[in-house]
Amino acid sequence: MTFPTIPPMHRDLDFNGPLSDERAARLIHSLGPLKGHHVVDLGCGWAELLLRTLATEPEATGFGIDLGEENIRHGRAGAEARGLADQVELEVGDAGAWKGEASDVVFNVGATHVWGGDPVVHTENALTALADLTRPGGRVLFGECFWKRPPTAEEITAMAVIPRDQYRPMPDLVDFALSHGFRLYSLSEATVDEWDTFENGNAWGLEDWIRDNPDSPDFDEVVRLTDAHRRLRLYGRDVLGFAYLTLLRV
């Protein structure tokens, strides 16, 4: 099945993740002075966090890469509208295969999957790559899920697409990140309200499509996938968290 065209998530969301305006500002502050620095966002989505970062420092430059053509189109339009087009380059491409030079600041937020492989090794793949792509003394903004508590067998079955071993408890996630050549500078986690804002915005486009396309040959499949996502959301609500780590490359 070729998934039908549905309203893009950026129709209803500012960020492609559980992130509020207030937390975004705090995360940007944790990156330190950005004058003259180059910021790389791997798996940037529509690059909202990258654009907000560059807007704080006119002498910073940025690069974002994502496989989603619509995401990149929207990001480029946003850069133009904010007068940031000369500061940033946004590219459609495979972030996991990108071989640019090590940078001052690197983002990988909710996108460990860009390096491929079994989901169980996504975090390892990401941290290994990020260590190579960040200059000594530079900073990484890393966003990844973690288990608030061990999931029950019922929860794992309901969440379906998430292997139990894909994520770690928060202390283990931090220790694992630091074992790749980093020090922890800043740590926070998404609130339930941030999760709800993200998940609601994620669902609205799908639910609008279901309402408007009852006769589509893809209707049953879209309903099945949407219902599966709802079960993941509900069963993961009390067990799945999202951590934001600002890491210093040593």
Image: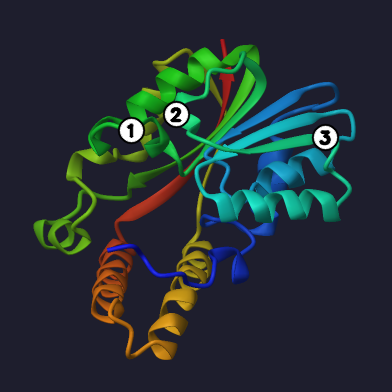
Which disc number belongs to residue 87?
3
Q: CA distance from mark 3 to mark 2?
A: 23 Å
Residue 159 image position (x, y, % from top left): 22, 60
What residue did someone put label 2 on? 96
Instruction: Give the CA separation, mark 1 to mark 3.
Output: 29 Å
CB contact under 8 Å: marks 2 and 1: yes
In this picture, is 35 found above or below 188? Answer: above
The amino acid pointed to by label 3 is Gln
Q: Quadrant of the C terminus?
A: top right
Identify the amino acid type marked 1. Answer: Gly
Instruction: Looking at this view, name the residue that lies furthest to the left.
Output: 153
The mark nearer the N terminus, 1 or 3, is 3
Q: Relative to residue 147, is residue 19 depicted above or below?
A: below
Residue sitting nearer the eye, 223 or 147: 223
Q: Residue at x 17, y 61 (%)?
A: 155
Nearest the viewer among 219 and 141 is 219
Residue found 65% across the figure and 12% down from its top = 137
Q: What residue does disc 1 label?
A: 116
On-image quarter of the N terminus: bottom left
Disc 2 from disc 1: Cα separation: 7 Å
